[in-house]
Image (tube, rainbow, N blue to C red):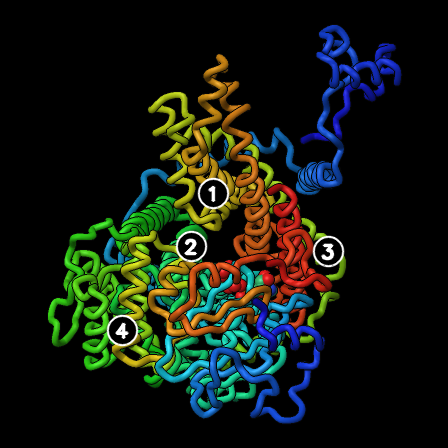
Amino acid sequence: MSTPDSSSTLSKPSTASDPGGEPAAPPTGPAGGAISAAEAVISTARLTKRFGTTAALDEVDLRVRGGELVVLLGLSGSGKSTLLRCLNGLQPISGGEVSVLGQRVDTASRGELRALRTQVGFVFQQFNLVGRLSCLENVLTGALGRVRGPRYGVLSYSRALRREALAHLDRVGLADRAFQRADTLSGGQQQRVAIARTLMQRPKVLLADEPVASLDPENAGVVMDLMFQICVEEGLTVLCTLHQIDLALGWAKRIVGLREGVKVLDREASGLTRAEVMEIYQRVEPGRPEGAGEGLPT
Amino acid sequence: MTAGSDPSSSPGSSSPDSSPASRSAASTGLLTPPEPEPAASAGPAIRPPVTRNGVQLTLTALFGVVAVVLSVWRLDLEPAELTDAFGDLGRLLKRMWPPVFDDPGRIAELALETLLIALIGTVFAAVLSAPLALLAARNTAPNRAVQAVARGIITFCRAVPDLVFAVLFVRAMGIGVLPGIMALAVHSVGMLGKLFADAIEESSPDPREAVRSTGAGPLRELVSGVLPQVVPSWIATFIYRIDINLRTSVVLGYVGAGGIGFALKDSLSGLVYDKALGLVTAILVIIIAMELLSVVLRRVLLSPPRGDRTGRTAPRDPVKVSAPWTNERITRAVSSTLLAATFVYGFVLLKVDLRELLTSIGDIFQVGTRLIPPNFTLAGWKLFGAVVETVAIGVVATAVGFVLSIPFGLLSARTVSPNRVVYAVARTLIVVIRAIPELILAVVFVVAFGLGPLAGACALAIASIGFLGKLVADAAEEIDLGPVEAVRAVGGGWWAQLFSAVLPQLVPALIGNTLYMLDVNIRHSTILGIVGAGGVGFLLFESIRTVNYEFAGGIILIVFVIVFAVERLSGWIRSKVI
Ligand SMILES: Nc1ncnc2c1ncn2[C@@H]1O[C@H](COP(=O)(O)OP(=O)(O)OP(=O)(O)O)[C@@H](O)[C@H]1O
Ligand SMILES: [Mg+2]
């Protein structure tokens, strides 16, 4: 099931250290239908990220259209989080190029990166809330990208911002908990607060890194449905990593599979079967780390 | 753990059992079911393995014992002299009794002044420490060079005793409360900066990342992602520091830096002992009152929410989006308003001039530059002797504190103390000891025993018993009771429980805190000289009084090096013990 481009990029090692020639047009066309560079809101070309000697991402080409909802699947350690973090510059990349909303991320100055981040929401697996602050204050931090100067305490934000934050909390069903400490909420509620914080950012793009991995199945369903619902209503471009194939197949427009940092699947979700998706999770060779010479097991 | 002791190789062993043959026979007994006869009488069959760590620790312990013996010898402490000394102390106390409060209004005024000096000094220290800690914490420092400089400043502030700063600042700014406030502020940066930075390093990176991914810059990231996490720990440290600074501010008057200490010095040098006891009593009252207040404050400000999930958590007013007035919010608002009001009132009452405050910063820098280049030669070998005496006082006091704090602490632990009366008596004693600042003890002991290191060593030893005793007691009350029950279950009595279940659990904390105590005691013993209780302090204060700043700079540098070395050593030992 290996796509032709991924096997061909594997065969030529480490050419990506220097982007060289033509940065705008990647030599190998993206899989999953042609998405032109102009259409793409998120686009990576030969994106490579190394930690020491291990390549967490190996020449990944990915394009996501505006308003598209893409789910990223893959085993633990396959590089999903790394990919998302490279997209908003939380992680500097080792090679290739990344652009989001027309802004080159890898070459962006600090100011440009900050300006970009204000438009890119990020939902974390561990929620990343400040536990001892109230839900409202946590949501208000979502506005930090567009206010001037440091803020401390709910009252340091303008009344308009407070009202907006409350409205977002209302949208995730937690307006009555506005002044409750975040760490006294359940996990599902905390992730809803985190989603409200992201909405406070008024993003155009949403990156979600296993938003429901630490929730029980029932809460996971509720939170995912809520998040995707809002994204569809707002017309956000979404790239979300998940471990739940059913949720992915239910909501995604397109599914992308990563295995050991290599893109191994990139297809429209409609018509995709569970069995085809499960192939992403097959290890190359359980015993050996690389399995270079052998082909993929079928 | 004692890999060094080996009964079979002791010189006096004449028994033939310790031959290699019997030893190997005994060791095979480990694999086969042990035969009782050789295992019981012959060499040590089952011994802990000799590890590198064990050897190093044993050598360190031996070194410690040698250091204590040498220190006792250096200070000429003899049992006869000690019993004499306690006789002297009894006579002095008799002359002091009953305490006299001849001008209660004046005493109250001085007490208030002392309290405000401590408070304002600590607030200044916190204001200075917060940015310094951000620069000194590994995860918030802009780069390693800045971090190293910030850490260096913090360590320096900690290593130079508050009274040394006070003397220097009094020289620079003249007699008054301002040098006292600034001395407390600068020295406290040493502790507040370090603990603030530690709290930052322990904070979670996750919320910061969330703030960063909204596009906020570094300052907003710190204020919204880091600060909310560390504030409770910072408040706890701040309140704790007010307690400590109050103990110093009662003696600031000794060097002309304001507060009740001046009156105490006056009445002692005028031999008006009953009045002095009145002042000491007043001092104890403010310190204990402050300690109670800080317990209350800590409880109010830092207790986690009471899990009141059904409480009022919706906005009070959906248009203004304002928080509901919960009890927690009310107490928080009231206590911070009170603190702010007291702070401002202190400024007015102590007549602290803001302009003077600003120029004082220039004065401080000027004094600092006059300490350079340090000079070590002015007093010749007297300096070396004084430094050794300083360290010896610290070592002896810590050793006495270590040994005596164990029985004291255990008796005042609810879980260990044999009965309630013993518990109550021991606890009360510890509370009283802890309330008396060591310099006040030193003052009283100097009057009783005469000038010299004996007074200083006794004062620091008693203070150490109080400090370590409380730690032992608290640790003993928090130990895991499982092992105690296990020993009881096999029929062990009180002593067996103590040695097999309680003490092993206390040892790491006790060692860690004793090493910390050594660090504190050496720093304190450098200022005992100001009241004539021995150590290098006398030379230090004399050199400042006679405007030999460069010599003072030399002494300060030596103290800094010693404190730094002790800190490194104790860090190393702690890493081995845990
Ligand atoms: N900061 C880091 N330092 C070193 N190696 C890292 C770092 N972050 C990720 N890696 C490595 O990169 C690889 C990809 O990690 P990543 O976190 O992206 O996987 P993932 O697909 O998100 O896994 P999971 O499903 O468990 O979240 C792993 O081998 C991981 O060990
Ligand atoms: Mg991950």
Q: Name the subunit of mark 4.
A: A
Using a 10 Å C-alpha cutoff, classify the residue at mark 4 as few (fewer than 14 neighbours), some (14 to 19) or many (20 or more).
some
Residue A292 point in image, percent of width and height? 71, 64
Q: Name the subunit of mark 2.
A: B
> Camera-side residue: B22 or B423?
B22
Which numbered disc covers residue B571?
none
Give the residue number, with chain letter if any, for mark 1.
B467
> Camera-side residue: B28 or A71?
A71
Give the residue number, with chain letter if any, for mark 3.
B384
Query: How far, Cα to Cα, is label 4 from label 2?
Result: 54 Å
In this rendering, would A197 be left or right of A45?
Answer: left
> Camera-side residue: B159 or B4?
B4
Q: Quadrant of the C terminus of chain B?
A: top right
On whether ligand 2 comes within 8 Å of the CB at mark 4, the answer is no
Query: How far, Cα to Cα, is label 4 from label 1?
Result: 58 Å
In this rendering, would A187 be left or right of A279?
Answer: left
In the rendered view, tell whether residue B98 sits above or below residue B189.
Answer: above
Q: What residue type is labelled 1?
A: Phe
Residue B423 point in image, percent of width and height? 37, 28
Give the residue number, with chain letter if any, for mark 4.
A230
In this rendering, would A259 be left or right of A84?
Answer: right
Which numbered disc covers residue B244?
2
